[in-house]
Every structure is written in structure tokens, then in C-alpha cells.
Image: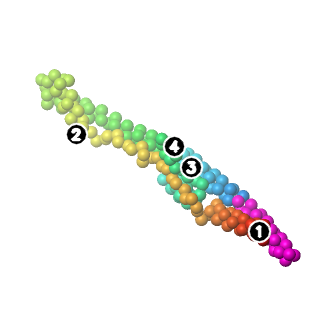
Amino acid sequence: MAERHKKNKKYKLLSLLFFLLFSASAIIFVFSLRSNYSHMSTLRDNLYAVDQNNGDVTTALNNLRNFVTGHMNTSLTKNNSLYPPVQLEYTYQRLLQSQLTKQSDNTKIYTDAEYYCQKTVPNGFYGAYRIPCVENYINTHSLYKINIDPSLYQFSFLSPSWSPDLAGFSMLATIILASLCLIFFTVSIIG
């Protein structure tokens, strides 16, 4: 009976030790998950600042993508939102504005179209005969058409369920230590 009591006491002490280690590991796990999310937020905010200031968006976007796809608790996925979570709004607006500026060059093409159609259809009623002529001329001579797909400037990244970093290893340690704690606690009670 005394030997059984010694074993139970030993199992309770081991159970307590594993519980303390489990608690420490769980705290490290929670803080490392928070750290991953915080770093992702910093990278995302940096990307938005670079986008707004017309900086090196490609590098900032690659830094964010590489971090999110390599670390837990950093997802930038499309949830119930209509639009993806990362949108390079300023890059898209700059490209759109440059296309609109190029589009203004089409004013000369319109003037040329009117001149061409006036010579080609000199006796025609303007609305019935010249409008199709002008439209055809513009369609065949216009160099710039605005056709920018906004989805090329919208991104959604998915983080892994487990990653080989402090968060991932502390998660494994927490699970293993919780299991060991439970096993030794159960053995000490049954024992």
C-alpha cells in the first residue's frame, strides 16, 4: 500500500510538472500567434503606405505574401467580404489615370474622324450616315482603350494551419504536454 502511495505521489508530481510546462508552452503559443499577426499587420500597413506613396509595391507585396504563407494566424483571405482584403487602390488609380491621359490623345483621332467622314460622305445627313463612319474610324484608329482588370490589383493570401516557427513548435509542445499531463494525472487517480 505504501509503495502504491509513493507511485501515486510520483505520478501526481509528474502530472504537476507537465501541467506547469504545458502552461508555459500555452502562454508562449498564444504570444507567438499574436506576434505573427502583429508582424503581418505591420507588413500590410507598410504595403498600403508604399502603394500610396508610389514606392516599390512589388517588394512590399512579396514580403507580405511570403510572411503570410509561411506563418500561422496571419490569413489574409476573402471572408464574407465582396472584395479581397488587400487592394492596391493607389496603384490601380495611377494606372487608370495614365490610361485616361492616353485616352485624351483620342481627341485628335475624333477630329480626324470627323474630317475623314466629311470628305468621304460629303452629301450625307450627319446623323444617319456620318455617325457610323466616325465610330468605325475611331475604332480602327484608336491606339488606347481602357481595359484594366481591377482583380490584378486585389490579393488574398492564406496562412498554413501549422508552420515551423515559434508558434508552430509551441503548439506541438502544448499538445504533447497536455497529453502527458492528462495521462499522468489519470494514472495517479486510477493508480
* Residues shaded magenta: 1-26
89 drawn magenta: no
Mark 1 and mark 4: Cα distance apart in space: 49 Å
- Check contact, mark 1 vs mark 4: CB within 8 A: no
The amino acid marked with disc number 4 is Asn
Q: Residue 27's x, y, as percent?
A: 72, 58
Give residue 15's position: percent from left, percent from top: 77, 67
Mark number, residue 44: 3
Q: Is the magenta stretch mostly helix, strand or loop?
A: helix
- Residue 78 position, x and y percent, is 50, 47
2 or 3: tag closer to the N-terminus: 3
Location of mark 2 (residue): 140
Q: Work out whether 102 lies above or below 1.
A: above
Tell me the crowding category of disc 2: few under 14, some 14 to 19, or many 20 or more residues within 10 angstroms, Cα based.
Answer: few
Q: Looking at the image, is mark 2 or mark 1 nearer the viewer? A: 1
Question: For the point 58% across and 53% down, which residue is it?
Answer: 74
Which amino acid lies under the numbered mark 2 shown in the image of this protein? Answer: Thr
Q: Residue furthest toward the front?
A: 1
Q: Which of 78 and 178 is in front in this view?
A: 178
At x 78% / y 71%, what residue is drawn?
191
